Image (tube, rainbow, N blue to C red):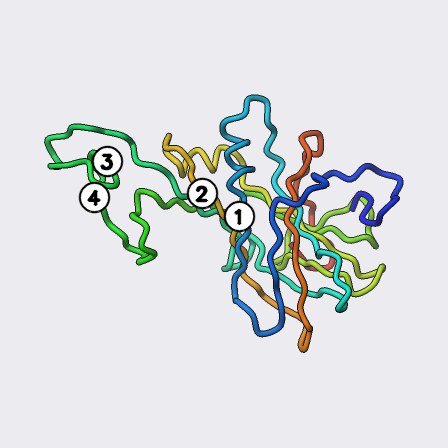
Amino acid sequence: GWSMLPGGQYAQPFSPTATDRVPIFTGGLGTISFDVTADVQRFLYTPGTVNNGWMLAAAPNLAGAVWVNFGSRESAQKPKLILETGPDLCLNNPLKGTPGQCGCDIPDLDTNLDNIPDCFDGVATVTADTTLRLAAPFGNDGTGTLLGVTSASIVDLERSLVKIDSDAIEAVRGGRAVTKAYLELTVAGIAVGWAGGSLELSRMKPLWDWQEGNGLAGHG
């Protein structure tokens, strides 16, 4: 679990500035989405940038504790990275009268009805995820179907790691420029009657590579 508490003896493995913060509360949305555009563009276009994914944690919350679970990659509701990409810039192709929005050889279709042509959409599913617990330092839990984020008490502090590796991102973008990127997670459980709070997503530092663990208490 590294040092989850301020002033811990081990260096924090994630960026001190959160990539994004989103609100969450009982009865809220079934999915949450973090804007990770700047991070993904850094992974793709800044030489030497290491992609170790993100850490998901509860933001400081004076209203009360946080308790929420998300579907892991072992579940039917896998975390996913949604990319919006630019056209291929093809200017002339006999199979298509004009390049349109999608460029040569690609129909301007919108099969998921999100008002964005399919050629601008791409979805990469998570390649690794796990839950960390303060009660089990330096262990991680990568075999279950849930990713936990809690701050109910010191002994129950949980954070989760999510990674979509660069090969998976490259396969989805197909050489096109990434204009937007969102990490989407599906809520699988949330504390009843919780007044609400926020979750923070932070980019993992380059030297902190990690692998999924072999399971601990049935999460992630």
Furthest residue toward bottom: 193
Question: Who's the residue at 46% across and 44% down the image?
Answer: 124
- Where 89 falls versus 70 (above or below)? above
Single out the mark in the foreground, 4 or 3. 3
* Of callouts 2 and 4, the N-terminal one: 4
Q: Which mark is residue 103?
A: 3
Report the Cα–Cα distance between label 4 and label 3: 8 Å
* Of callouts 2 and 3, the N-terminal one: 3
From the viewer's perspective, is 22 left or right of 66? Answer: left
* Of callouts 3 and 1, the N-terminal one: 1
What residue is disc 4 on? 107
Relative image position of residue 201 (x, y in whole percent): 63, 48
Q: Amino acid at mark 1?
A: Asp
The answer to whether marks 2 and 1 mark residues whose Cβ atoms lie closer than 8 Å is yes
From the viewer's perspective, is 5 left or right of 58? Answer: right
Question: Who's the residue at 40% across and 39% down the image?
Answer: 172
Q: Which mark is residue 35?
A: 1
The answer to whether marks 2 and 3 mark residues whose Cβ atoms lie closer than 8 Å is no
Single out the mark in the foreground, 1 or 4. 1
Relative image position of residue 73 (x, y in whole percent): 55, 52
Q: Amino acid at mark 4?
A: Pro
Q: Amino acid at mark 3?
A: Gly
From the viewer's perspective, is 76 left or right of 12? Answer: left
Report the Cα–Cα distance between label 3 and label 1: 26 Å
Mark 2, Cα crowd under 10 Å, few <14 / some 14-19 / many 20+, is: some
